[in-house]
Image (cartoon, rainbow, N blue to C red):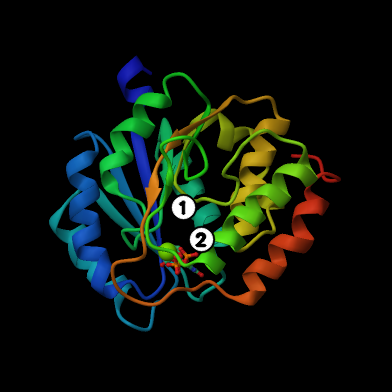
Amino acid sequence: MSETSARIPWLILPTYNEAENIGPFVAAVGEKLPAAARILVVDDNSPDGTGEIADRLAAEDERISVLHRSQKEGLGPAYVAGFREALAGGAGLILEMDSDFSHDPAYLPRLLEASRGADLVIGSRYVPGGGVSDWGALRRAISRGGSAYARVVLGVGVQDLTGGFKCFRREVLEAIDLDSIRSRGYAFQVEMTFRAIQRGFTVVEVPIVFRERRAGASKMSGMIIAEAVWRVPLLRYRRGS
Ligand SMILES: Nc1nc2c(ncn2[C@@H]2O[C@H](COP(=O)(O)OP(=O)(O)OP(=O)(O)O)[C@@H](O)[C@H]2O)c(=O)[nH]1
Ligand SMILES: [Mg+2]
């Protein structure tokens, strides 16, 4: 494989009821990605028709494809299914981000550039230059507290463990036993980063400013937070694969 084909990025976009966002979002990321990049939408049978909209986008643009799953199972299983498809398709880099404009497509080139020097790049709210633009004090505290909790419990130096704007080198996902990933919500983000560190991969954080979603409703729930609280300590006691 040549140097260039080895680095072909696949962007995985999980969607659940993102009908208003998905069209403009796919167009926005498409402008920021290299021409050879692929965009894979992973839709969990959204009742609002996101999957059908994504199918129409895919029919018009060969860079785009859609993975339809039968039911909503959370972010974790959707990403794992997307990772498998990207690996099978020959991806050199696998990017993940929210499909609601909270993660600004303008940062994509920076993540890709940083991936030349690290196995896992994290778009980070909690390094100098990063931040959150329009959250209230409570949501800020939950997020910051969650990252700090996971950092202390797991004993790692990464500042933003719960964020979902990332770029993995292919080798990282190949080294992690994806079958054994059980986390569904934010815990999934913590678990993937922790497993990468456990396996000796290098991590770099690049600053991003996180914004409120542009349209549609949040899927965050008490369940998702609770899952992270009890699952994170367990991560220490499980081998990566
Ligand atoms: N396929 C799939 N996608 C999901 C699921 N839950 C959330 N998503 C998507 O994952 C991304 C992040 O979820 P959000 O609902 O934005 O959750 P959040 O970012 O924690 O919450 P907000 O900041 O309030 O938007 C979005 O693109 C969602 O559409 C799911 O169960 N399945
Ligand atoms: Mg969001």
Find numbered disc 1 in the image and state the secondary structure of the residue it sits on.
helix
Is 34 displayed left or right of 40 in the figure?
A: left
User: Which residue is rendered at x = 46% and y = 69% of the image?
Assistant: 69
**Quadrant housing the N terminus:** top left
At which x and y percent is residue 125? 47, 45
Marks 2 and 1 in Cβ contact (< 8 Å):
yes
How many marks can you see?
2
- Residue that label 1 marks: 82
* Between 143 and 80, the one nearer to me in the picture: 143
User: Which residue is rendered at x = 38% and y = 62% of the image?
Assistant: 134
Q: Can you tell me whether the CB of the residue at mark 1 lies under 8 Å from the nearest atom of ligand 1?
A: no
Q: Can you tell me whether the CB of the residue at mark 2 lies under 8 Å from the nearest atom of ligand 1?
A: yes
**Quadrant housing the C terminus:** top right
Is 73 displayed left or right of 198 in the figure?
A: left
Cα distance in 3D space between marks 2 and 1? 6 Å
* Between 80 and 96, the one nearer to me in the picture: 96
At which x and y percent is residue 104? 30, 49
- Residue that label 2 marks: 78
5 versus 34 height, above or below: above
**Rendering quarter of residue 167:** top left
Residue 104 in sight here: yes
The amino acid beneath tag 2 is: Ala
The amino acid beneath tag 1 is: Gly
177 versus 98 height, above or below: above
Outermost residue to the front: 137
**Rendering quarter of residue 42:** bottom left
Q: What crowding class fits label 1: few (fewer than 14 Cα within 10 Å), some (14-19), or many (20 or more)? A: many
13 versus 155 height, above or below: below
User: Which residue is rendered at x = 59% and y = 53% of the image?
Assistant: 144
Residue 2 in sight here: no
Is 8 displayed left or right of 80 in the figure?
A: left
At which x and y percent is residue 2? 34, 16
